[in-house]
Image: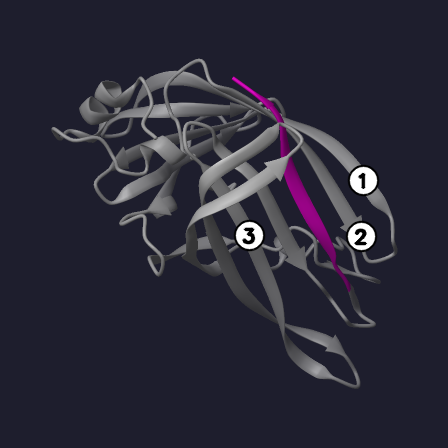
Amino acid sequence: MSRLPPRWPLWPGLFALAWLAGCNQPSPAAGYFPLQAGHRWTYDQTTEWANDTLEHETVELSNEGSDTLFDGPAFRRRSASGVDYWLRGDDSGIFRVASKSDLDPDPKPDEPRRYVLKTPLAVGTAWQTPTTAYLLRRRQEFPPELKHSHPSFPMHYVIEATDEAVTVRAGRFEHCLRVKGAAALRLFADPVVGWKDMPLTTLEWYCPDVGLVKLVRDEPANSTFLSGGKLTLELIAWQ
């Protein structure tokens, strides 16, 4: 996912992040989104399509250290699927600055910043980040994925809770942040309803020392011209 995507107490690489941010204090969000090399996460991704079809996929992410990128150093996070993401942290939060697939010759900068977590880490803190439709599809058009015709639109995020307990296959985690994202994509639903704002929502849980432990993305269609689905990302192992 483009935030693919984030959005993870304090970790051993605080001094590295302080150096990265160019200030004397690390990002307050660093404890909920570890960036230092050596961390790995394995998730089970379940996609429930509108036709009751279930798909499972294993998603693996790893932190690969820091690189010099554009105007300074950035931490690189790599997906086993072949996509690299570069992130930085400062007093404003954790944000992505570039991404690159194995097919891209060079990293593509993110402008403006794509925040994963924004400070202060308090209920009500809000921000906006571009997203696309990952699950909504046209039933009778090609290509069916809406991300081709609507590659970017804003999703509004807000911290809804700061002390939540979450149980996933990797274990039980406490004192977690719950972040909600909401967006609307105006589409032609069908000849009866006409144009309609289709809701897209994301729920994300970030836990101390670990990072993202669960994500739920919901893109319902309720339309004869469109189909939707629900995606759940659940942590099953980490180090």
Cα gap from disc 3 to disc 2, whole angstroms = 18 Å
The residue that disc 1 covers is 55
Position above or below: 3 against 74: below
Kindly tell me whether residue 124 is visible in this rendering.
yes
The circle drawn on residue 203 is 3
Mark 3 vs mark 1: in front = 3
Inspect the image, locate mark 3, and give the three-letter code of the amino acid beneath it.
Answer: Leu
Residue 25 point in image, percent of width and height? 16, 31
- Residue at the (62%, 27%) spot, across then down: 170
Query: How many residues crowd around disc 1 within 10 Å: few (fewer than 14), some, or many (20 or more)?
Result: few
- Residue 23 picture quarter: top left
Q: Report the span colored magenta.
A: 227-239
Whether residues under marks 3 and 2 lie with C-beta atoms below 8 angstroms apart, the answer is no
Cα gap from disc 3 to disc 1, whole angstroms = 20 Å
- Horizontal side of 114 relative to 105 (left or right) equals left
The residue that disc 2 covers is 49
Q: Nearer the viewer, residue 6 or 138?
A: 6
Query: How many residues crowd around disc 2 within 10 Å: few (fewer than 14), some, or many (20 or more)?
Result: some
Q: Is residue 157 magenta?
A: no
Earlier in the chain: of badge 3 and badge 1, it is 1
Position above or below: 231 against 146: above
Element assignment for label 1: strand
- Residue at the (34%, 18%) spot, across then down: 66
Residue 183 point in image, percent of width and height? 53, 64
- Residue at the (52%, 62%) spot, across then down: 182
Q: Is residue 236 magenta?
A: yes
